[in-house]
Image (cartoon, rainbow, N blue to C red):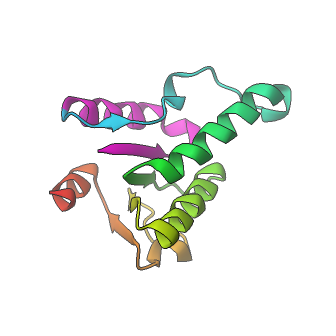
Amino acid sequence: MKFYIASRVKNKQLVRKIHKTLTKLGHEVLSDWVDETDIIPYEKHIEASKIRAIECAKYSSECDVFILVSDESGAGMYTELGIALNSNISGNKPKIYVIGDYVNRSVFFFHPFVKRFKTMDEVLEDLK
């Protein structure tokens, strides 16, 4: 399966760990933003930010499984969630999951196409 993991940049280490787990299980991770050069502040890296935005929007809609690692705040990951939800509504994919400690933070986490779990292991179990 093709996975996309959305999260805040500060969670890079956790996202890397998830990527490694998925790759070991034979899955494909569509974005490697966690291994790319940091482009914050975005206004100082306009071209790189444009490319990253295009790629993340594309992967959020083309993946088989979209996972948002919840946090107490964030910005771009919620846009990616909206893209994934719209893709699911119009085309029945991707499967959408929110994981972590803040799975009640947004009204969109309660959309019927979104499943909320504490851990990545619970997602993998659900996908079996």
> Residue at left 62%, top 20%?
37
> Residue at left 58%, top 45%?
58
> Residue at left 45%, top 78%?
110
Q: Is residue 70 above or below residue 90?
A: above
> Residue at left 76%, top 35%?
50
**Horizontal side of residue 22 vs 12, given as left or right:** left
Report the magenta stretch's main SS: helix
**Horizontal side of residue 65 vs 21, given as left or right:** right
Q: Which quadrant would residue 102 be assigned to in this image?
A: bottom left
From the top left corner, tell me how far across and down residue 64 is, in percent: 37, 52
Q: Is residue 127 above or below residue 32?
A: below
Q: How many marks?
A: 0
**Horizontal side of residue 35 vs 82, given as left or right:** left
From the top left corner, tell me how far across and down residue 41 is, in percent: 78, 32
Q: From this viewpoint, is residue 97 visible?
A: no
Q: From this viewpoint, is residue 114 visible?
A: yes
Q: Nearer the viewer, residue 79 or 63?
A: 63
**Horizontal side of residue 9 vs 97, given as left or right:** right
Residue 5 among magenta residues: yes
From the top left corner, tell me how far across and down residue 96 is, in percent: 40, 62
Q: Which region shows up in magenta?
A: 1-24
Q: Is residue 98 above or below residue 25?
A: below
